[in-house]
Amino acid sequence: MFGLIGYLLRKAKFDPAPLLLAIVLGDRMEVSLRRALTISNGDWWILVQGATSKIFVGAVILLAVLQGAAWIFGFRRKMAEDAEKI
């Protein structure tokens, strides 16, 4: 069954690696999230209070802004057209 799912994902041009990571690490991440929320009495801000998490949140925001700018200016479309010409 997983082989069929992998085949369909490849046909749809999806990378199966993130799905595999989600399957393998999903349970551990959920347990850790529940533990953190239990320790903080349900306060979600505990997840972004550390310096490392602030760096990651900043990086995600920066990447989202850059992706949006690339989409607006058509950078990806131009790169795809150039790649097809080669």
Image (cartoon, rainbow, N blue to C red):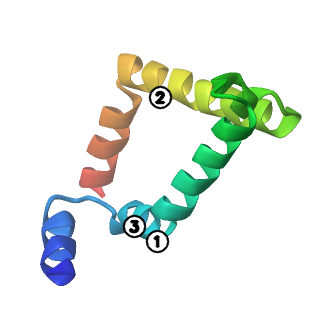
| Furthest residue toward right | 51
Q: Are marks 2 and 3 in contact (CB under 8 Å)?
A: no
Q: Which residue is mark 1?
A: 24
Residue at 57% across, 31% down: 63
Across and down, in percent, residue 37 comes to: 65, 36
Give the Cα distance between marks 2 and 3.
Answer: 26 Å
> Which callout, 1 or 2, points at the residue further toward the start of the chain?
1
Residue at 15% across, 58% down: 12
Across and down, in percent, residue 27 comes to: 48, 62
Q: Which residue is mark 2?
A: 67
Q: Nearer the viewer, mark 1 or mark 2?
A: 1
Q: Nearer the viewer, mark 2 or mark 3?
A: 3
Across and down, in percent, residue 71 comes to: 37, 24
Quarter containing the N terminus: bottom left
Across and down, in percent, residue 78 comes to: 34, 34
SS type, badge 3: helix
SS type, badge 2: helix
Q: Is residue 77 above or below residue 12?
A: above
Q: Is residue 79 above or below residue 27?
A: above
